């Protein structure tokens, strides 16, 4: 009889524990929304090339922390560098050709200006000589008239008259020669002036070379831009989540090479059964369990409740009465983690308990 009392006491304690556990589970059932298949999410940045090319080197590794503008991928760029080198050589040749034309134009204009000055001086000199001879001829003409008058009066011999006439004729011939020389000199001046058009031709050639130089410089700048595309830089501070392509692979523009994520922007995406979603409100506290951290509790807060349901096929959960393989209409709920663990990765599984103490309608 005495041996049965301990046994009954044990049974009583077990039953009492079961009742208390049932009460706790019932209380927990009505005060929490539980989802055991939540996932860690983050903003993913897919890195791709803007040009087609072969990968020369992947500079970073998966899991590596990187800074904004840090090089991530290097594509082969030998062809572009050779093209830039060839364009620079062509630009140098055009520069030399332009300088040569400038010197030629300068020398031509210097020579032409010298010829024009010399010719103008020559014309002025001949004109002065012409005027001097002309004045002497006029004087000689007067002398002829005077001597002829004296000869008629038989005051001087005939030889004197003949000498004055000869002198007049010589001066008259000199005047004609000087006039002809002036005409020839002016024609030569016109010819020199006509050759000035050569300077205009050289100027046009220089302008064409300048246009060609501008085109080559633009081509070099375009090639430099193309070259910059061959080194892919990180647009954000973050972590290398995954490397999709490797050295030696040919990639086309738009094809993902690396996926980055920002470790400071993790959140949890939980899909709550539509029968329980009415209890979930923005601002509710959430208890979070990560499978990677089985002995630690983390906390968060509901920041967004979706408006559309998502049909999913999943396991039976405490918040879902559906059987394995059944279609469950769920609503996405976003939860921010207050103090996230150091090592989180997108897709990591978590369980969330959303406390609904403030919810009015529990049924």
Image (cartoon, rainbow, N blue to C red):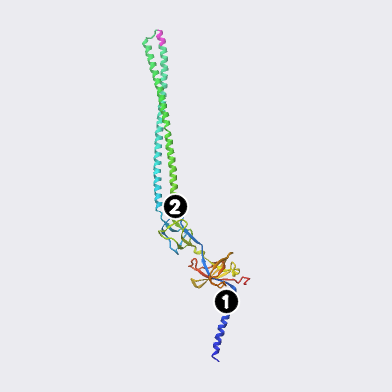
Foreground: 76 or 329?
A: 329
**Quick one: label 2 or label 1, which is nearer the N terminus?**
1
Q: Quadrant of the N terminus?
A: bottom right
Image position, residue 340 (x, y; %):
51, 68
Q: Secondary structure at mark 1?
A: helix
Foreground: 105 or 333?
A: 333
Relative height, residue 18 to residue 360 (above, below): below
One can see residue 333 in this view? no
Q: In the rendered view, does 222 fall on the left or right side of 324?
A: left
One can see residue 204 in this view? yes
Image position, residue 274 (x, y; %):
59, 68
Residue ID for mark 2: 226
Q: Is residue 337 magenta?
A: no
Q: Secondary structure at mark 2?
A: helix
The residue sitting at 40% across, 35% down in the picture is 108
Relative height, residue 168 to residue 72 (above, below): above
Residue ID for mark 1: 25
From which residue to which does the magenta span run?
A: 148-153
Foreground: 226 or 147?
A: 226
Measured in 3D between alpha carbons, the distance from the residue under mark 2 to the one under mark 1, in whole angstroms, is 65 Å
Relative height, residue 7 to residue 247 (above, below): below
Image position, residue 287 (x, y; %):
55, 71
Q: Residue furthest bottom?
A: 1
Q: Residue furthest left?
A: 159
Q: In which quarter of the view is residue 165 placed?
A: top left
Q: Residue furthest right?
A: 360
């Amino acid at each position: 009889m005495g041996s049965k009392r301990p046994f009954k006491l044990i049974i009583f304690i077990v039953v009492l524990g079961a009742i208390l556990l049932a009460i706790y589970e019932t209380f927990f059932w009505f005060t929490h929304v539980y989802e055991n298949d939540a996932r860690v999410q983050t903003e993913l940045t897919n890195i791709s090339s803007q040009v087609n090319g072969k990968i020369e080197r992947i500079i970073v590794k998966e899991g590596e922390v990187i800074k904004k503008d840090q090089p991530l991928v290097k594509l082969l760029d030998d062809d572009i560098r050779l093209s830039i080198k060839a364009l620079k050589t062509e630009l140098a040749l055009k520069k030399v050709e332009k300088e040569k034309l400038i010197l030629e134009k300068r020398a031509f204009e210097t020579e032409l200006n010298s010829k024009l000055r010399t010719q103008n001086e020559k014309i002025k000199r001949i004109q002065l000589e012409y005027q001097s001879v002309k004045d002497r001829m006029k004087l000689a003409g007067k002398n002829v008239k005077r001597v002829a008058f004296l000869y008629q009066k038989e005051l001087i011999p005939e030889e004197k008259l003949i000498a004055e006439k000869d002198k007049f004729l010589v001066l008259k011939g000199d005047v004609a020669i000087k006039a002809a020389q002036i005409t020839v000199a002016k024609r030569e001046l016109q010819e020199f002036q006509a050759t000035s058009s050569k300077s205009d031709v050289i100027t046009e050639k220089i302008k064409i070379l300048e246009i060609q130089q501008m085109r080559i410089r633009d081509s070099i700048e375009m090639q430099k831009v193309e070259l910059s595309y061959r080194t892919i830089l990180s647009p954000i501070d973050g972590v290398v989540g995954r490397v999709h392509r490797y050295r030696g692979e040919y990639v086309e523009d738009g094809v993902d090479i690396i996926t980055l994520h920002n470790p400071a922007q993790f959140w949890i995406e939980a899909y709550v059964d539509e029968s329980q979603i009415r209890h979930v409100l923005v601002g509710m506290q959430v208890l979070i369990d990560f499978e990677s951290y089985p002995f630690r509790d983390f906390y968060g807060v509901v920041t967004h409740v979706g408006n559309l349901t998502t049909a999913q096929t999943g396991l039976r959960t405490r918040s879902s009465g559906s059987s394995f393989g059944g279609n469950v209409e769920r609503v996405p709920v976003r939860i921010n983690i207050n103090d996230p663990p150091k090592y989180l990765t997108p897709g990591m599984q978590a369980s969330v308990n959303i406390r609904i103490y403030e919810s009015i309608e529990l049924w």
